[in-house]
Image: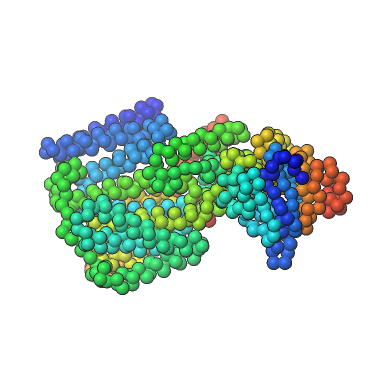
């Protein structure tokens, strides 16, 4: 079967499954329409986006299609999730946005930030503060404003970063993360001090949106849950832009600087400029993630954006696979489900949910996972998968050259250089 | 020096470099014009690498100027070279280790005009088109050098001689008028040396070439002129034949090995 035919068959199969699932679970007429629309978009988008000619000739279109399909499938899936799980998934999506930014900074440009929890907090508070002063601003605009504020903070800290390398830059971002709670409390008239801020009268969902996204189960037409959809869509948009960036000239400039800064300068890449751009984009992404969290929770608390969050972010991206887009998404999913897993664990072991151990379990589990990742697959989940695929392709190529299908043993290529 | 009427691409004008009392370069003057191949030779520690690094802006001259008269520029920073049509290869291969061969070659076109960060982010049509053209040109360059087959491999997985060609392909992607080669012959076998020499001779039609090299058998038949450095000073310039018979050069350098 040719690759194109196989893709077509896959898309058709997906369409049928989606239709059957949707029709059995969503018996009302309006929902049926929504389900059909979702399924058709998924099948058509998947088919068009995966066509080899589209991928070669219109890579941005292929990426857009892929994004639409992914977001579409997630929205479709959330229709069948319980409300808390949907919320956790959206929280993980917000985290994935932050991880995209961090993955870009570290993986593409080779810089490291230990302060992304604080940049996230910048976006989170920017959203809350703006919403409290301008209640009528549309959500999209508020999010954009938060992104700009995050980018400005990134610029502020990124400019000195052009002169700092390695541990010194990490130290500076560490200082920002540690100082952030103190900064919040010294501007308590703006930030609400220790109690944080509530968003004003929470907006209600337009009905067409509820109908389109949350087909089916009646619990999902409650007023607040449409916010999870906004978060998913925003994450999709962030994902699309980041995929563009990774594949673009700007993304390549980052990788060149990371791999060999002398050779990068010789092909015309300005080192300070490239480093600042990476830092600003990364901070803007972190701020968007924080803004989405504020939106989801309808409030923001300074306790959320303490130093521990920065460490968690770092742990999750390493587990997912630093430097890759898929690693950020995997990290987001891991983060989303950690809440569920911990709740399950607490219930099974009969721990006191309010007790010391239960409240620290988060850190213990991520710490253990981080150590395990560093020991057994330092490239993270995504990096390891990619590495195995490259090895297999190379082995196949060499096997072909020798007229055998058996690949030679390859020395593991170092993925942790620099 | 260069022929009258032909404007120099690169000109060292009484360049000196001092490193805390050590004179790495001492009042060095020479020029490279379009269409000529100039070899920069000398014993170890003579200042060849320093001369290259001054030309590329990695080291600032303590005195004098490095000029690019054809573009009216002088004492450039390393990342400004590509824009004035200067490309340089590095000792060894100097490739980007975690980027594919194709991407390494595409990097050579990094200074081509393009829309910037926002265009990259949104994948605007102009930026996407430029990227596609760059990919196509890089592929054509790999084909021209006969190494298109390794386009999607990582540099660490290809033979050394091939990696050197990738480095050359990357340098040529910027359509340079001056090509600076830092020890192009090192690590190559006989057949690869011949092939490399043939490429360089072909390139002379469109650009000037300045190369630093230890391998005299490779340099002598290839270059039009030699500049011989010793202890940071130019001790001789001229055609390979003139230099071969120069007493100072024989004493300083060639006499030892021949």
A12 sits to left or right of B178? left
Please say whether residue B3 is visible from this viewpoint.
yes
Q: Is residue A287 above or below residue B143?
A: below
What's the residue at 77%, 43% (across, down)? B225
Q: Position of residue A186 (x, y in %)?
A: 31, 73
Q: Is residue A92 above or below residue B217?
A: below
Q: Viewer-proximal residue, B214 or B227?
A: B227
Q: Position of residue B82 (x, y in %)?
A: 58, 46
Quadrant hosting residue B188: top right
A246 sits to left or right of B74? left
In this view, the residue farthest toward the left is A28
In this view, the residue farthest toward the front is B5
Quadrant hosting residue A137: bottom left
What kind of colouring is applied to the model shown? rainbow
Total residue callouts? 0
Q: Position of residue A75 (x, y in %)?
A: 24, 44
Please say whether residue B160 is visible from this viewpoint.
no
Q: Quadrant of the N terminus of chain B?
A: top right
Q: Position of residue A355 (x, y in %)?
A: 25, 70
What's the residue at 57%, 39% (across, down)? B173
Q: Viewer-proximal residue, A269 or A396?
A: A269
What's the residue at 49%, 48% (across, down)? A253
What's the residue at 29%, 33% (across, down)? A44
């Amino acid at each position: 079967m040719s690759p194109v035919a196989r893709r077509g068959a896959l898309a058709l199969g997906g369409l049928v499954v989606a239709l059957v699932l949707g029709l059995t679970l969503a018996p009302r007429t309006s929902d049926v329409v929504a389900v059909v629309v979702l399924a058709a978009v998924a099948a058509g988008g998947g088919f068009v986006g995966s066509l080899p000619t589209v991928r070669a000739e219109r890579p941005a279109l292929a990426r857009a299609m892929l994004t639409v399909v992914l977001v579409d499938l997630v929205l479709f899936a959330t229709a069948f999730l319980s409300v808390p799980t949907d919320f956790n998934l959206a929280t993980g999506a917000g985290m994935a946005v932050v991880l995209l930014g961090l993955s870009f900074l570290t993986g593409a440009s080779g810089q490291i930030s230990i302060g992304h929890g604080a940049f996230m907090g910048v976006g989170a508070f920017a959203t809350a503060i703006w919403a409290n002063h301008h209640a009528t601003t549309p959500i999209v605009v508020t999010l954009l404003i938060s992104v700009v504020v995050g980018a400005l903070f990134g610029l502020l800290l990124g400019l000195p970063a052009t002169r700092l390398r390695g541990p010194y830059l990490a130290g500076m971002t560490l200082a920002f993360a540690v100082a952030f709670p103190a900064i919040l409390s010294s501007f308590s008239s703006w930030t609400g001090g220790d109690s944080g801020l509530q968003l004003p009268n929470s907006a209600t969902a337009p009905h067409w949106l509820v109908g389109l996204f949350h087909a089916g189960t009646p619990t999902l037409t409650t007023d607040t849950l449409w916010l999870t959809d906004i978060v998913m869509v925003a994450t999709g948009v962030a994902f699309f832009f980041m995929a563009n960036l990774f594949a673009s000239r700007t993304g390549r400039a980052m990788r060149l600087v990371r791999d060999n800064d002398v050779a990068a300068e010789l092909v015309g890449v300005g080192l300070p400029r490239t480093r600042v751009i990476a830092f600003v984009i990364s901070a803007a992404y972190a701020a968007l993630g924080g803004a989405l969290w504020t939106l989801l929770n309808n409030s923001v608390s300074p306790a959320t954006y303490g130093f521990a969050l920065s460490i968690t972010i770092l742990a999750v991206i390493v587990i997912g696979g630093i430097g890759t887009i898929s690693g950020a998404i995997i990290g987001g999913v891991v983060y989303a489900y950690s809440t569920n897993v911990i709740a399950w664990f607490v219930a099974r072991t009969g721990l006191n949910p309010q007790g010391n151990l239960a409240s620290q379990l988060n850190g213990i589990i991520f710490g253990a996972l981080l150590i395990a990742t560093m020991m057994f697959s330092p490239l993270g989940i995504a990096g390891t998968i990619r590495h195995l695929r490259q090895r297999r392709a190379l082995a196949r190529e060499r096997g072909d050259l020798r007229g055998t299908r058996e690949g030679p043993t390859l020395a593991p290529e170092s993925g942790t250089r620099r | 020096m260069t022929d009258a009427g032909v404007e120099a691409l690169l000109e060292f004008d009484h360049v000196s470099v001092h490193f805390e009392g050590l004179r790495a370069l001492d009042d060095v003057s020479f020029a490279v014009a379009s269409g000529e191949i100039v070899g920069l030779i000398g014993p170890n520690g003579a200042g060849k690498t320093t001369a290259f690094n001054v030309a590329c802006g990695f080291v600032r001259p303590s005195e004098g100027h490095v000029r690019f008269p054809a573009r009216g520029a002088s004492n450039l920073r390393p990342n400004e070279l590509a824009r004035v049509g200067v490309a340089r290869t590095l000792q060894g291969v100097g490739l980007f280790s975690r980027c594919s061969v194709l991407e390494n070659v595409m990097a050579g076109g990094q200074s081509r005009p393009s829309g910037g960060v926002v265009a990259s982010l949104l994948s605007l049509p102009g930026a996407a088109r430029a990227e596609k053209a760059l990919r196509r040109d890089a592929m054509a360059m790999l084909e021209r050098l006969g190494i298109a087959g390794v386009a999607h491999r990582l540099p660490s997985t290809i033979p050394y001689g091939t990696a050197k060609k990738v480095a050359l392909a990357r340098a040529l992607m910027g359509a340079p008028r001056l090509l600076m080669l830092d020890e192009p012959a090192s690590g190559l076998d006989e057949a690869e040396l011949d092939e490399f020499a043939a490429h360089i001779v072909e390139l002379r039609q469109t650009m000037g070439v300045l190369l630093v090299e230890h391998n005299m058998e490779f340099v002598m038949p290839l270059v039009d002129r030699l500049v011989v450095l010793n202890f940071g000073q130019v001790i001789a310039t001229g055609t390979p034949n003139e230099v071969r018979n120069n007493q100072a050069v024989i004493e300083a350098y060639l006499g030892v090995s021949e």
